[in-house]
Image (cartoon, grey):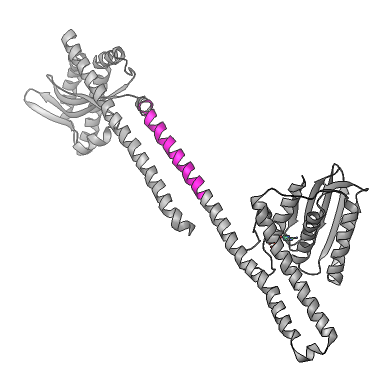
């Protein structure tokens, strides 16, 4: 069920996230394109300005310098014997000449100046990639290098901006090459430019996720409550049916001829009926009490009471009811402590704990009632029963909560006893705590302010 409702919402959130990622990516790509265009056009304008001012193509000095070695290299081409020799030779010539082009040029200085004037990033790296290089001697030509298209693309980095392709022909060479610039800080600059989009995107993601989590939590809470109510109705029907059927059978039994003539049997059956009616009455009262507390303020009939005396009466009743089926110990050390309490509710509260100690036991229940008085009166009920796991301890005082799920309970109950205990303890200005280990037993302690 949870899956059914939340799968579409989770899918919607994922789609939203992906769309945000796509939007940010799109904005980044657009900004990147604009960035490259801006730097390229400024660089080109700087080139034009440089030619106008100096009459230099930007590489004139380099062209002049490379002509000399080029003639020497041409002479060496005759000595190349095999293919491997020619490859090594080409590489040597290419790196030598492109090194000279990179070193003896004016271009980078002019471009950097133009960037600075316009407030752009003036620091950049540049790269020269040769497209075609020939060594020449009169009408003889030796092709040193021709860049294959795919190799050019591979050599070039994504961030390289092509400023211009240059072409030059000297006495002993013919060359065509590309001049690229690479703005090192580009990513940072772009990040700054898209920061608003990024922040808005992240914010909407955080808000959406928060809404999603809150809705999920709410739904799970509602669902738990609705499951608990369903369990409660099942349990209540079961709890009410049992004494009712016993009363019905007992009523029929009373009409039987052989019973009518036996006074003892009549008395036994009547006792059974009154015991079951009392149980039924208690159950209905418990449910009514709780439903009244939901709507109105707790009304306590407060009396100054000697707690030790009252606890002794409760113990007496419990010991008689329990008989030899359990071991019951009481350790009461209250020094006559008095507290303002409603005797009926207080008695029910302690009895609930005592009965649970028996109800949730494995073998023979060993129940200990301890009471002491410090700043508050503390009353503990300890048992050697099945115990409660840590995760269930968080919920046992909730209305309708029972350990286990659905109707799979070996013990009967409505999940209201501990809720009742907590409500009453709080109405007396106190509280209740639990400490328990599965398989070892539990200790419930009620704290009540003393006078
Ligand atoms: P009920 O007994 O009607 O189920 P309670 O509110 O009294 O309802 O108890 C809630 C749940 O807490 C019980 O279903 C039981 O699983 C657990 N519980 C209560 N008291 C004990 C105890 N002494 N030992 C182990 N489990 C207990």
Residue 37: image x %, image y %?
24, 25
Q: Is residue 196 visible?
A: yes
The magenta stretch spans residue 195: yes
Question: Residue most toward the left?
Answer: 139
Residue at left offset 19%, top offset 26%: 177
Please state which of residues 406 and 268 is positioned toward the viewer in this rendering: 268
Whether 337 is drawn above or below 351: the answer is above
- Boundaries of the magenta span: 190-216
Question: Residue most toward the bottom?
Answer: 258
Please state which of residues 260 and 61 is positioned toward the viewer in this rendering: 260
Residue at left offset 81%, top offset 83%: 266
Question: Residue most toward the top?
Answer: 53
Q: Is residue 381 left or right of residue 124?
A: right
Q: Is residue 394 left or right of residue 217?
A: right
Whether 5 is drawn above or below 268: the answer is above
Q: Quadrant of the C terminus?
A: top right
Residue 116: image x %, image y %?
31, 14
Q: Is residue 317 left or right of residue 120?
A: right
Q: Main secondary structure of the magenta part?
A: helix
Please state which of residues 355 and 347 is positioned toward the viewer in this rendering: 347
Whether 238 is drawn above or below 344: the answer is below
Q: Is residue 202 left or right of residue 230?
A: left
User: Which image quadrant is residue 93 in?
Assistant: top left
Q: Is residue 394 visible?
A: no
User: Which image quadrant is residue 270 in?
Assistant: bottom right
Residue 189: image x %, image y %?
36, 24
């Amino acid at each position: 069920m949870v899956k059914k409702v939340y799968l579409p919402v989770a899918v919607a959130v994922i789609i939203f996230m992906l769309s945000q990622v796509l939007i940010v990516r799109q904005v980044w790509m657009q900004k990147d394109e604009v960035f490259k265009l801006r730097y390229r056009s400024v660089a080109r304008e700087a080139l034009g300005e440089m030619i106008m001012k100096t009459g230099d193509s930007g590489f004139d000095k380099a062209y002049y310098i490379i002509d000399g070695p080029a003639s020497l290299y041409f002479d060496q081409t005759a000595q190349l014997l095999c293919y491997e020799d020619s490859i090594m030779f080409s590489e040597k010539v290419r790196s030598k000449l492109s090194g000279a082009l990179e070193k003896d040029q004016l271009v980078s200085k002019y471009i950097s100046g133009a960037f600075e004037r316009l407030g752009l990033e003036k620091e950049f790296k540049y790269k020269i990639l040769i497209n075609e290089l020939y060594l020449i001697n009169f009408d003889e030509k030796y092709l040193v290098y021709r860049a294959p298209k795919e190799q050019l693309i591979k050599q070039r980095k994504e961030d390289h901006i092509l400023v211009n392709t240059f072409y030059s022909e000297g006495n002993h060479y013919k060359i065509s090459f590309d001049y690229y610039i690479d703005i090192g800080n580009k990513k940072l600059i772009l990040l700054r430019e898209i920061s608003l989009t990024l922040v808005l995107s992240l914010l909407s993601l955080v808000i959406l996720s928060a809404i999603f989590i809150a809705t999920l939590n709410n739904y799970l809470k509602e669902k738990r409550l609705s499951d608990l109510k369903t369990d409660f109705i099942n349990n209540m029907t079961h709890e009410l049916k049992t004494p009712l059927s016993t009363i019905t059978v007992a009523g029929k039994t009373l009409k039987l001829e052989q019973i009518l003539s036996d006074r003892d049997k009549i008395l036994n059956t009547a006792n059974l009926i009154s015991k079951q009616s009392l149980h039924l009455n208690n159950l209905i009262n418990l449910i009514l009490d709780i439903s009244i507390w939901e709507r109105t303020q707790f009304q306590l009939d407060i009396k100054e009471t000697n707690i030790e005396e009252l606890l002794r009466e409760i113990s007496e009743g419990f010991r008689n009811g329990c008989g030899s089926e359990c071991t019951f110990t009481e350790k009461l050390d209250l020094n006559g402590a008095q507290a303002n309490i409603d005797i009926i509710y207080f008695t029910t509260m302690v009895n609930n704990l005592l009965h649970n100690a028996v109800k949730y036991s494995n073998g023979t229940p060993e129940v200990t009632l301890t009471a002491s008085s410090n700043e508050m009166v503390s009353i503990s009920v300890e048992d050697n029963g099945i115990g409660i796991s840590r995760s269930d301890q968080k919920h046992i005082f909730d209305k309708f909560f029972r350990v286990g799920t659905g109707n799979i309970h070996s013990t009967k109950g409505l999940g209201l006893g501990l809720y009742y205990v907590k409500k009453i303890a709080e109405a007396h200005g106190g509280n209740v705590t639990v400490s328990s280990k599965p398989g070892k037993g539990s200790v419930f302690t009620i704290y009540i302010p003393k006078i």
